Image (cartoon, helix red, strand yellow):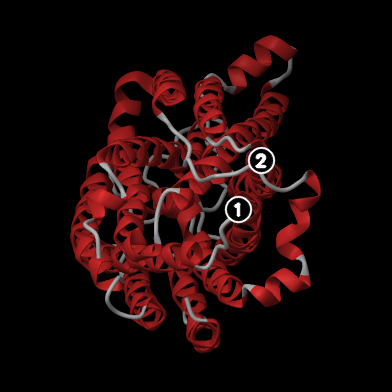
Amino acid sequence: MKKINELFPKSKWLILLLFGTVGQLAWSVENMYFNLFVFDTIAPNLDTVTLMVQLSGITATVVTLIAGVISDKVGNRRSFIGWGYAVWGVTVALFGCLSPELVASVFNTDATQSIAVALTLAIIGDCVMTLFGSTSNDAAFNAWVTDNTRSEIRGRIESIISILPLIAMLIVAGGFGILVSLVGYKWLFIGLGAVISAVGIVGIFIIRDDPGMERSGTLGDILYGFRPSVIKAYAPLYLTLIVVLIYGVATQVFMPYLIIYMKTYLGFSVIEYSVVFGAAIILGAAVNIKLGALSDRVSKVKLLYVAAAVMSLGLFGMYLAPAGNKTVALLVFGISGFVMICGNIFLGALTGSTVRDYTPEGAVGKLQGVRMVFSVLIPMLIGPAIGNGINKLRGIRLEDVVEDVGADIMTTEYCPAPEIFLVGALVLLLIAAAVPLLDRAVRKFGK
């Protein structure tokens, strides 16, 4: 087999790492810190957090379906990536300017109305940001990666790609908390938006589309991936996407509430949850670099059992972390978080590389939307609803777990409950039912 640098040269590595990292940083901000921003600065309302996640998932899927087909039709990923990132950054910057005070000054509303309008605008702003993010990253960038990689190196490349969200989470969970205390949300989001836009402008000049890519398809191909004949012809792809769906639902049960949980229920300070989360991510990423190479030599399908079991074990340990003893909680949550993240990254790498393996050439763009239905739309509709339902049932009030909630906080609001991790672990076990079907399809269709 040719060396990986011959099949994927340094120039492509630069594009992959730069746009992959910055894109995941933006998504991490949306998935984790926009939630905390709303919770901290507008109102501690988990219903709004849940709705933001759900509507963002719908927006991302619809946009990716359309943008993926258009990028195939015009035969141009570069412009979608470069200009898309440039505008994406502007929307991130504007989001940080939102506040009830700004709403009150613009619309002349009272305090209660200002909060309600600010929450509504936060949801709308999140969807607008998702529109440009999904166009540039989910549709165009993901298609560019598939265009420019071959099956024999995708396991290793996907292992790197799967680490990027965790690196972004490390930066967001740790560094952003510290930066917020120094400069505030507004300037933090303005700075991040400027970085995203600058990277987009650079991309206009350095990204090159695969020379072998040809213009294909029509706008009618938006529904291409949902045709029964296509599903039947590419059964391994769709069965892999079912595994992605299960994995996504399990993750979305707890992920939107993770930092809020550490900050409220466990009582971790910014430094404490940054250290715990950061150490788990760094160690998990190091372990999975080795596992990525292994997945190119061993059946990716069989390894799904291992990855799902590891992530489930980690989530169960996170559920057991006690709220009453911070020292023990830091230790248990840190070790369990490391185990969970190892399984999380490995699952992402295995499913991601398998999806690329079984995505037919010439239909890469038009199938990005189908991937989004399974990886984003359904998980982000179902997962947060399950998680927030659990939170509501437990009804753990902020005033019962936070020593000083402040006079301006509605103390009847509830915080995330530990059971979200237990349920996430149980959902992951459904992968054991899907993998045998995928294994049979892979052996039948071959690759």
Point 48% across, 44% down: residue: 144
Horizontal side, residue 95 vs residue 191: left or right: right
Q: Amino acid at mark 2?
A: Ala
The image quarter containing residue 332 is bottom left
* Mark 2 residue element: helix
The image quarter containing residue 325 is bottom left
In the image, residue 384 sits, relative to residue 216, either above or below, namely: below
Is residue 399 at all visible to an observer of this figure? no
* Residue 204 image label: none
Point 39% across, 40% down: residue: 404
Q: Name the one closer to the observer, 397 or 37.
A: 37
Q: Name the one closer to the observer, 241 or 430.
A: 241
Contact, mark 2 vs mark 1 (Cβ under 8 Å): yes
Point 70% across, 61% down: residue: 225
User: Would you name the residue on which mark 2 appears?
Assistant: 67
Q: Amino acid at mark 1?
A: Gln
List the single residue furthest toward the right.
220
Which x, y percent locates residue 318?
33, 68
Horizontal side, residue 328 vs residue 300: left or right: left
User: Would you name the residue on which mark 1 appears?
Assistant: 368
In the image, residue 253 sits, relative to residue 141, either above or below, namely: below
Disc 1 packing (10 Å; few <14; some 14–19; many ≥20): many
Q: Name the one closer to the observer, 315 or 216.
A: 216
Mark with earlier residue (2, 1): 2
Which x, y percent locates residue 101?
59, 17
In the image, residue 122 sits, relative to residue 412, either above or below, namely: above
Which x, y percent locates residue 156?
29, 60
Which x, y percent locates residue 319?
37, 70
